[in-house]
């Protein structure tokens, strides 16, 4: 038997919520994430921000620091926020359509100058189908004619600094966009005016260039999820883990990048993943996450962990992963588990993924 993490039997412990970014091309999805990460580069290492494999982890401490101006007494009960930034990724379709659903919440990015566009509607339909909660980032507010930059300011504060003309321009756009959402059958409202949070989705105006509204969206993501999804976010020892990508890494052979949604993974765990030729039974040799931002570009250097607790993005090194299939689940063979049972569970997962591959 392996040692458990010190706090893993705390029944009230929450794991980090998982968030993904969706929206039409060129609305600023990439830029928004770059900004959120980029502004952290200097303080980043101290605060422990790590860019995972297509997954970024923001520790609560960092979020508290960045949202201080917004609400000094923000009580954050989750350890952090995990953002998946591979929305266009092929395996993401598989991954997202899994029954359990990987993300608690999505950021739907809309360009304030363009309003709802074809892929916004597509994203909306996916979100509706999966019953996934979301926050609208009404991005590129700095493009409103005459916008006065208020770097990293909470949006209400930035808005007060604007001229009457800019405020009117903003309101016109906002009303238009709220109407467009209405046409899609959805109620939306500027988040700090939203009194009916159950049925009305929040809009947070943002700029991925100068950072207005970024504190708001970070705080809202964390507070909203920890308030409305306590049950779902309660940490459990039962491992829930999805393979995001299968990658060959120089010096490490074939590795898998996974999102650990719940539970703990340990070096030396026996795992089963789906393979093209059947279930792959192997042992975790290394659990890796990239170094903090600064060292990210140094090829092939990662942080090694003896164990990692959910929610996290992790690179796993193990033998025999050459034919692993992205989008499927990873299972851990526990001391009381029957290997054949676990293999069968894995096979079921594979069948559903394969039928989808056949169709495309
Ligand atoms: P994506 O396709 O949704 O990932 O969009 P990108 O992040 O690649 O952004 C598309 C273009 O819009 C790029 O030229 C960005 O520099 C620009 N852009 C993104 N966000 C903003 C913003 O908040 N303000 C302004 N002015 N430009 C932005």
Image (cartoon, rainbow, N blue to C red):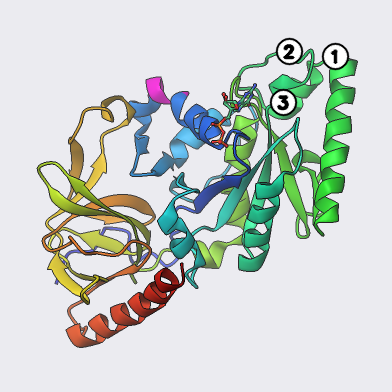
Residue 87 position within the rendered picture, expressed as x and y whole percent measured from the top left: 50, 48
Residue bearing mark 3: 141
The quadrant holding residue 124 is bottom right
| Marker disc for residue 148 | 2
Query: Residue 40 or 68: which is nearer the viewer?
Result: 40
At 58% from the left and 47% from the top, the residue drawn is: 22
Evaluate whether residue 15 shows in this view: no
Looking at the image, is 69 positioned above or below residue 51? Answer: above
- Find numbered disc 3 in the image and state the secondary structure of the residue it sits on: helix
**Pair 2/3: label in front:** 3
At 28% from the left and 30% from the top, the residue drawn is: 296
Residue 239 position within the rendered picture, expressed as x and y whole percent measured from the top left: 33, 68
Q: CA distance from mark 2 to mark 3?
A: 10 Å
Instruction: State yes or no: discs 2 and 3 in contact (Cβ < 8 Å).
Output: no
Residue 14 position within the rendered picture, expressed as x and y whole percent measured from the top left: 46, 58
- Find numbered disc 2 in the image and state the secondary structure of the residue it sits on: loop
**Pair 1/3: label in front:** 3
Q: Main SS of the magenta segment? A: helix
Query: Residue 65 or 158: which is nearer the viewer?
Result: 158
Task: Say which label, 2 or 1, has the lower sequence index.
Answer: 2
At 48% from the left and 60% from the top, the residue drawn is: 93
| Marker disc for residue 163 | 1
Residue 19 placement, left or right of 152: left
Looking at the image, is 293 positioned above or below residue 197? Answer: above
Evaluate whether residue 263 shows in this view: yes
Point out the stretch of residues depicted in magenta. 39-43
At 18% from the left and 35% from the top, the residue drawn is: 301
Instruction: State yes or no: discs 2 and 1 in contact (Cβ < 8 Å).
Output: yes
Residue 156 position within the rendered picture, expressed as x and y whole percent measured from the top left: 75, 28
Task: Say which label, 1 or 3, has the lower sequence index.
Answer: 3
Q: Is mark 3 within 8 Å of ligand 1?
A: yes
The quadrant holding residue 317 is bottom left
């Amino acid at each position: 038997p392996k040692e458990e993490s010190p706090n893993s039997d705390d029944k009230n412990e929450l794991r980090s919520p998982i968030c993904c970014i969706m929206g039409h091309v060129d609305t600023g999805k990439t830029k928004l994430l770059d900004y959120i990460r980029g502004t952290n580069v200097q303080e980043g290492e101290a605060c422990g921000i790590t860019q995972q494999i297509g997954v970024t982890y923001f520790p609560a401490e960092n979020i508290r620091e960045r949202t201080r101006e917004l609400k000094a007494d923000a009580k954050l009960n989750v350890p952090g926020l995990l953002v998946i930034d591979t929305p266009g990724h092929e395996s993401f379709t598989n991954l997202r359509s899994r029954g359990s659903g990987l993300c608690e919440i999505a950021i739907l990015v809309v360009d304030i100058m363009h309003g709802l566009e074809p892929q916004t509607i597509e994203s909306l339909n996916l979100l509706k189908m999966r019953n996934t909660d979301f926050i609208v980032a009404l991005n590129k507010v700095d493009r409103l004619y005459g916008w006065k930059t208020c770097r990293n300011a909470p949006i209400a504060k930035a808005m007060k600094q604007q001229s009457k003309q800019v405020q009117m321009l903003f309101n016109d756009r906002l009303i238009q966009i709220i109407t467009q959402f209405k046409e899609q059958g959805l109620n939306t409202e500027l988040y700090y005016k939203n009194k009916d949070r159950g049925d009305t989705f929040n809009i947070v105006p943002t700029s991925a260039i100068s950072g207005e509204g970024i504190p708001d969206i970070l705080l809202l993501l964390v507070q909203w999820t920890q308030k409305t999804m306590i049950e779902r976010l309660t940490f459990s020892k039962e491992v829930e883990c999805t393979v995001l990508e299968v990658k060959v890494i120089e010096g490490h052979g074939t590795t898998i990048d996974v999102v650990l949604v719940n539970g703990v993974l340990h070096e030396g765990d026996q795992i089963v993943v789906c393979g093209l030729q059947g279930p792959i039974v192997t042992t975790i040799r290394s659990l890796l996450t990239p170094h903090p931002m600064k060292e990210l570009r140094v090829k092939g250097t990662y942080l090694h962990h003896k164990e990692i607790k959910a929610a996290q993005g992790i690179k796993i090194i193990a033998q025999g992963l050459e034919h692993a299939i992205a989008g499927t689940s990873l299972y851990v063979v526990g001391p009381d588990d029957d290997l054949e049972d676990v293999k069968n569970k894995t096979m079921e997962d594979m069948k559903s993924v394969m039928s989808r591959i056949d169709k495309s």
